[in-house]
Image (tube, rainbow, N blue to C red):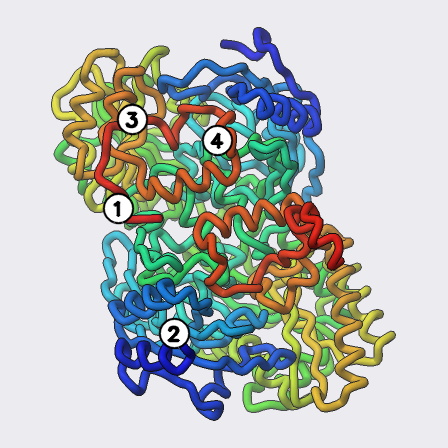
Amino acid sequence: MTRAELADALRDIVGPRGVLSRASELLPLSADGLPTYRIPPSLAVLPSTRQQVIDVVRLLARERVPFVPRGAGTGLSAGALATGDALIVGLNRLTRILYIDPVNRLALVEPGAVNVSLTRAAAAHGLHYAPDPSSQSACTIGGNVAENSGGPHCLKYGVTLNHVVAVTVLLPNGKICTLGGADGETRGYDLLGAFVGSEGCFGIALDVTVRLVPDPPAVRTMLADFMSIEAGARATSAVIASGILPAAIEMMDGPTIRAVEASIYAAGYPADAEAVLLVELDGLEAGIDDEVRRVEAMCIDAGARTVRIARDDTERARLWQGRKKAFGAMGRIAPALVVQDAVIPRTRLPDVLHTIHEIAARWNIQVCNVFHAGDGNLHPNIAFDPHDADATDRVHHAMREIMRACIDAGGTITGEHGVGLDKLEYMPLIFSPESLDAQCRLRGVFDPERRANPGKVVPIHACREWFASPAARTLA
Amino acid sequence: MMPADTALRAHTTQDVAAIIKDAGARRAPLRIVGRGHWLDAGAPARPATPLALDALSGIVEYTPGDLTLTARAGTTLSDIAAVTAEHGQWLALDPFGTDDGTIGATIATASAGPLAHAFGTPRDVALGLEVVTGDGSIVRTGGRVVKNVAGFDLTRLFTGSWGTLGVITEVTVRLRARPEVDETWAIALDGDAAIGAACRAALGAAAAPIALELLDAPLAAALGLGTSPTVLVRLAGAAAAMRAQRDALRPLGAAAPEPADIWQRLRAAEPAGSTVLRLSQLPDRIGDTWQLAGHARPVWRHASPSRGIVRMIIHTADDTAAAIARAAAGRCTLIAERAPEAFWTDGPTPVPNATLAARVRAAFDPAGILNPGLAPDAPRSPAPPPADG
């Protein structure tokens, strides 16, 4: 089948408006949320129904065509980009919330359902969907499953993995299976756990059953500001070690604060501070104010100038808006922003943040830190002009040094954004060839032909099996 | 079978790798043994040479401020409890049995107990593993940080795989700070008819219990809790929050304080030789699941209402377990924690996604030498062709 014949066969399934083949139509699908990758696909198909998804994937299986599942394209690891002759299967037209079961606190959604729309739909029952990535107003549940997405409130409530109870999976070979189950425990291997976070390499989620969480009866949001980022990190470490488990502990550094305050998302952060901590406590009304006072005291001990407690929901929403829209606000600094992602042990926050600051100064770049401090999940973001080749080069060098510093501190290369294409080069720094090979073996279970999102997550050339082959040694 | 009688004992990960490579070359099956508590669940496991991991023990790394701990697989839960208690922390896993079990076996069998109500199961607690797969490769999964999406999630795959994909040699887990107050209350219910309403009221109360377990009257009596069905509620938190939580439970009935060891006694309640079945459905179906034992005696039941799980302890080796399994077929998920051989060979349902499961097994233990015959790939009666694969 030629490419044109394939496009026609796809049109027969999804209709003429469901296939994109002109360069101008495909432009929006050539990137995700990372500005450093731009790979235009040659073809994209946008099914509107579950049956169309199944028919498309079965056609691709017959024709052995590689494909990339894609949700809203808000990812930050260049994971939903089509390389080579892979085509994109867009799932963002399957947006239905199929049911909400308020008694058992479950919801069944299609993969293209937007994260926040589920929380809005559950609100009438006093429930919400806990994982809340900053892109939650656009990102899809299917994409969240693929990336095992996090968010500020994952500190207390857990990441996507902890909230998905079942997925109906369309395997790359076109067969359908249900992993996990809403109605009781699951026997056998935890294939659901293996599927969550598989970055589209194991198949497509046709529907997802998620757990909903009761809205907490009491919420307190507080803002502490510091004259050094180390002081904010010390406060974070103290709170974590104390045994209080806040719903969220988010940190923003001076450059981030000033970008937010200069933008339409201004949240009332003290513009002269070098760090603010946004701490949210939630739970039962009884005892919560006592915890607020303890956290306040720990912040003051660590050097906080002031600690402010939101008086009402409006003030609380405003404090959060600054955090959730911080990436957008950084558009004021430079045309492009590399949003990075790494995790370190929480006791290492002060020294690693110091190291990142040194690296940035040495390469003469501007790093804005806005991150999930309570989890040790850093987002050192670099604003730069992609048309400035020298600046771009310095950004890449600094990024590598920052990742190396996080790994040296006992950390990992991604906490919630995934590996995609962007982190492939770092995988051999944290996994041995044997360990990478084991990951390849797992992929082989779901997709022996490696047609689903090829070239992502595991750098094949670093696997043991690659080293073992004489041909590979010659190439290397 | 105790580890002391075993022929093979590993002291290091390299020992495990060497033993597995040797066994693989000879196609000689191995039975993985921690402290010998879970073993083969009573399944008709084929003869295999025991590989004891009890000497592969000790804490590898523990930084209290990070609330993470790395231990070798043969480390007992009680050793971990002792080390973490010094820093006011704990590993919030209380699998049925005793704390003499090992962390490796707890993860390998995905065993959890009443604390799963609030803190989840091993899949929610395990952060990273070191595993020797069936070909002798030493594989590291996950890491030592609390959030990690680097690569495919082998940690979840090996958790609960019953040693059939690899031998877990090291485990990193998430810890929690011990609550300031940790107290347990027993609420006696007015007969079986009151169970449904009590569970709903307990789950809806303005309290945040870390465990909430329903016990039937015979089990309550065996634990010295009186002669009524009983709800055990474990409240924890800051002292300032406790009074309000206790008040919130008042509508359920009179609550009597219980010493903390009630949970150890519940975990160790099953008499030797019992058959233990776990039945689960949606939480709002727990009343039906609870009744699946019918009037069979002697059976003790207890349930975790928030998780929809009823655990049945059957004291006799007759056909009671088989009768319960027949009643459960098509109505709920049945997992046998321990059952006589006859029960396994007449197993009621095939493992879901059998084709994928078989492929996983072949990918990680190509020679089939690790815990052959064990759940979750235990032999089952002929089944319709699976949809997967």
Q: Secondary structure at mark 3?
A: strand
As drawn, the residue found furthest toward the right would be: A362
Left or right, residue B214 beside residue A147 = left
Q: CA distance from mark 1 to mark 3?
A: 17 Å
Q: Residue at x 77, y 60 (%)?
A: A404
- Residue at the disc numbered 3: B277
As drawn, the residue found furthest toward the bottom would be: A24
Q: Which mark is residue A183?
A: 1
Do marks 2 and 4 share a subunit? Answer: no
Q: Position of residue A209 (x, y in %)?
A: 32, 57
Do marks 1 and 3 share a subunit? Answer: no
* Mark closer to the chain start, 2 or 1: 2
Q: CA distance from mark 4 to mark 3?
A: 21 Å
- Residue at the disc numbered 2: A1
> What amino acid does circle 1 point to?
Asp
Q: As rendered, which of A276 and A391 lies closer to the eye? A: A391
Q: Position of residue A167 (x, y in %)?
A: 34, 55
Mark 2 surroundings: few (<14), some (14-19) or many (≥20) residues within 10 A: few
- Residue at the disc numbered 4: B164
Q: CA distance from mark 2 to mark 1?
A: 43 Å
Q: Residue at x 31, y 73 (%)?
A: A94
Left or right, residue A473 beside residue B73 = right
